[in-house]
Image (cartoon, helix red, strand yellow):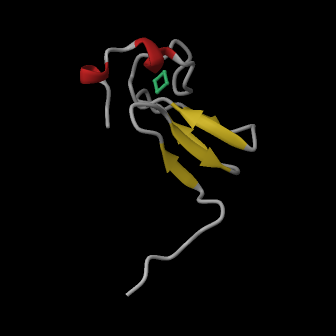
């Protein structure tokens, strides 16, 4: 059985960083507020430290690797 190959996956989990979403999506934050993506590729924070939740603002880059999600 072979692994399927995709040119452009819709969701990419970046090690220690955000989840990249390709295309139009609606993201619900922990408060239940819906946020619509507005870019061809949107970065959703997975570290919980972004100052612009639910979007990644690059803060994960300064978090010690031991505290980051894989
Ligand atoms: S994943 Fe980038 S700031 Fe959280």
Q: Is residue 7 left or right of residue 20?
A: right
The quadrant in which the C terminus is found is top left
- Which is nearer the eye, 28 or 53? 53
Question: Quick one: which residue is furthest to the front in this view?
Answer: 2
Q: Is residue 55 left or right of residue 60?
A: right
Instruction: In the rendered view, tell whether residue 52 sits above or below residue 25.
Output: above
Residue 34: give x, y in percent of width and height: 57, 36
> Residue placed at 24% from the left, 22% from the top?
66
Q: How many marks?
A: 0
The quadrant in which the N terminus is found is bottom left
Residue 33: give x, y in percent of width and height: 53, 31
> Residue placed at 43% from the left, 27% from the top?
31
Residue 59: give x, y in percent of width and height: 48, 15
Instruction: In the rendered view, tell whether residue 62 sits above or below residue 66.
Output: above
Instruction: In the rendered view, tell whether residue 25 sits above or below residue 51.
Output: below
Q: Is residue 48 left or right of residue 8?
A: left
> Residue placed at 44% from the left, 20% from the top?
60
Question: Quick one: which residue is furthest to the bottom in this view?
Answer: 1
Instruction: In the rendered view, tell whether residue 38 sits above or below residue 48.
Output: below
Residue 57: give x, y in percent of width and height: 57, 19
Q: Quadrant of residue 67?
A: top left
Q: Is residue 21 left or right of residue 16?
A: right
């Amino acid at each position: 059985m072979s692994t399927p190959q995709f040119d452009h996956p819709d969701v990419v989990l970046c090690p220690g960083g955000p989840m990249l979403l390709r295309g139009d999506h609606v993201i619900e934050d922990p408060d239940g507020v819906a946020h619509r993506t507005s870019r061809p590729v949107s970065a959703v924070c997975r570290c919980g430290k972004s100052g612009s939740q639910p979007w990644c603002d690059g803060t994960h880059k300064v978090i010690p690797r031991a505290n980051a999600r894989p």
